[in-house]
Image: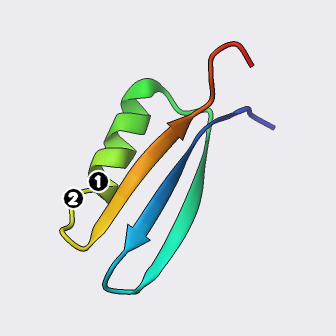
Amino acid sequence: MGRVDAIIVTVDLLKRDSEIKILIGCSEAEKRLILASLNDSPSMKAIIIQRPENT
């Protein structure tokens, strides 16, 4: 199994819910693309929490 690189926390105001997405084995470019696509809506926003490099 791959290493967890980061998590993304989303909040959807229309659905009135939130989610945590676990990113495993993603490159920095892939993380940026995922975050940008999740923030592409006025009703849904996301933040990324990255694992420190040395752990």
Q: Position of residue 3 (x, y in %)?
A: 73, 32
Instruction: Report which residue position mark 2 lands on.
Output: 40
Residue 37, disc = 1
Q: Residues within 10 Å of mark 2 (few under 14, many from 20)?
A: few
Quadrant containing the N terminus in the rendered view: top right
Above or below, 55 against 7 in this view is above
Occupied quadrant, residue 11: bottom left
Query: What's the residue at 62%, 22% (across, down)?
Result: 52
Residue at (29% x, 53% y) in the render: 37
* Left or right position of 38 against 47: left
What residue is rendered at 18% in x and 69% in y? 42
Helix, strand or loop at label 1? It is helix
The location of residue 23, given as percent across then percent down, is: 59, 44
Residue 49 is situated, as x and y percent measured from the top left of the image, at: 53, 40
In this view, 28 is above or below 17: above
- Give the crowd class for mark 1: few <14, some 14-19, many >=20 residues within 10 Å: few
* 52 displayed left or right of 46: right
Three-letter code, disc 1: Ser
Give yes or no for contact between labels 1 and 2 (Cβ–Cβ under 8 Å). yes
Query: Which numbered tag is attached to residue 29?
Result: none
